[in-house]
Structures are given as structure tokens and as C-alpha cells.
Amino acid sequence: LTAAEGDRPLAGRRVVVTAGGTREPLDPVRYLGNRSSGKQGYAVARVAAQRGADVVLVTSAELPVPQGVRAVPVETALEMARAVEQEAVGADVVVMAAAVADFRPAQVAGHKIKKTHEAGPDGAPDESAPTVALVRNPDILAGLVAGRGEALAPVVVGFAAETGDEAASVLEHGRAKLARKGCDLLVVNEVGAGLTFGADESTVHILRRGSEDVLDVGPASKDVVAGALWDAVAELL
Ligand code: CTP
Ligand code: CA
């Protein structure tokens, strides 16, 4: 191992990272969104670039783009799915750190939805509350797993924010999700119970497909979590 390789273990690797919560429009001024800050995904992209990788960041967050990273801005889950599908061709690794909306409004109004609707047949203005119908978004990670190693990147990493509940612990939920999703690594983020979304320190458990071992990281900064993730990925490359 030369000094340069030790410093830049991802040199020559192409990686795609997604970050941020997607925004699903209802009309030209409103959307359905979530509280994801995007900070963890940006840290994953930043550390990969520091370690020498060629990094594409498909992002629905608006944070400063880390040095040496190419950003592809997107808004919706559908836009993110299209961008990832393109960028993952020929890549070595895709890390899905984005909080992708599971559903989107079935219809996007072309104009601002008004509080009082047009008068009905009886002439009275309609002030009833509207109902928003939703449809499922594609599962981007599932598409990557299906195309893994053929057209798309051979290593696929998922993220999951989990809380424990009566049925199962954070780890049990994480293991079940890894089995269901079939990705190579799953970074399970503990949320709830005083562990706030967007906080600077996080506690994660990195699970590997086909292994019982768990790598516990934190409470630690998002850069430290990102470093642990790339260490785990390096073992798979
Ligand atoms: N993900 C994705 N496409 C979606 C939803 C999620 O690629 N439409 C990815 C996320 O980026 C993350 C992983 O799948 O890396 C797990 O997301 P999560 O929301 O925890 O999993 P879901 O299968 O959507 O399960 P849940 O019902 O818990 O939301
Ligand atoms: Ca989800």
C-alpha cells in the first residue's frame, strides 16, 4: 500500500450518494415533505470525496455542495429515481441516504388550490375540506438491488431511521428491513426518545447482508458515521 492509496482508499471509484427529503408537490406552491436535513448524506459525499472517490450527489436538500462533489439537484422521488438510474450506470457504490417519500399526491393541481371551491350545482360556495389521494412512489433502493452488478453499481447501501416499539427493538427492525430490502449494508439510525432529527450527533448500527455482526457507531458526528460507512464499504470492494 503506498501512502497515496492509504490516504485516498476510494481513488478511482465512482460513487453515487442521495441526500435530503424529497418534496412531492400538491400544487405550484405546496408540497408534502419530511424533516430530513440532508446533513448525513452530504457528510457521506464529503468523506467519499476526501478519500479520493469521484462523487455524484443526487440531492433534494439545499446545503453547500462539498468540495470535489458533483451535485444533481432534484425535488421529487420520481426525479430522484430517474437521476439515480442514470448515474448508477458504471458506478461502484450507491448510498441511499435520502428520505424518499413513500407516496406522492395522485394529482398535482396546475393552479393554487383555493380554500373555497367553485360554487356547486346549487350555487352555494363549497367550503368542505379537500381529500388528498396518494399513490406509491417507486422504491429506488429496490431497483438498485434488482440491477446490482449487471448494469448498475455492485454495492448498494441503505439507510433506515428506526425507533424501538412494543413489537421489536431498533436492531430487530433494522435486521428485518435489511432482509426485506436486500442491500449490502444498512445504516440503522436510532431516532425518537430524545434523539432528534437534524441533531449533530447520531447513534447508528451498521448491518451487513449475510452477517450477524453489528458495527455500533456513536453517539458521533455525521462525518465519523460517514467514515465508518466507507470503512465498511471498502471491505466489500
Ligand atoms: N428508499 C428508496 N425509495 C423509496 C423509499 C425508500 O430508495 N421509495 C430507500 C431510502 O433511501 C433508504 C431505504 O430505502 O435507504 C430505507 O428507507 P425506509 O423508509 O426506512 O424503508 P421503507 O421500505 O420505505 O420502509 P418504511 O415502511 O419503514 O418507511
Ligand atoms: Ca419509507
Image (cartoon, rainbow, N blue to C red):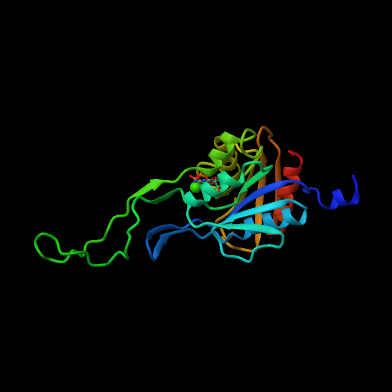
Image check: 202 left or right of 181? right
Q: To which quarter of the image does residue 178 belong?
A: top right
Residue 49 seen anywhere in this rendered image of the structure: yes
110 is higher (above) or lower (below) than 180: below
124 is higher (above) or lower (below) than 14: below
The residue nearer to you, when weighing 213 against 147, is: 147
Which quadrant, please, contains the C terminus?
A: top right
The residue nearer to you, when weighing 193 against 148, is: 148
Image check: 224 left or right of 111? right
In the image, farthest residue toward the right: 2
- Residue 221: % across, % down: 70, 60
Q: How many marks?
A: 0
Residue 221 seen anywhere in this rendered image of the structure: no
- Residue 225: % across, % down: 70, 54
- Residue 83: % across, % down: 55, 49
Q: Residue at x 54, y 36 (%)?
A: 180
Q: Residue at x 67, y 43 (%)?
A: 91
Which quadrant, please, contains the N terminus?
A: top right
Q: Residue at x 76, y 40 (%)?
A: 235
In the image, farthest residue toward the left: 122
- Residue 210: % across, % down: 67, 32
Q: To which quarter of the image does residue 208 belong?
A: top right
93 is higher (above) or lower (below) than 44: above
Image check: 102 left or right of 8? left
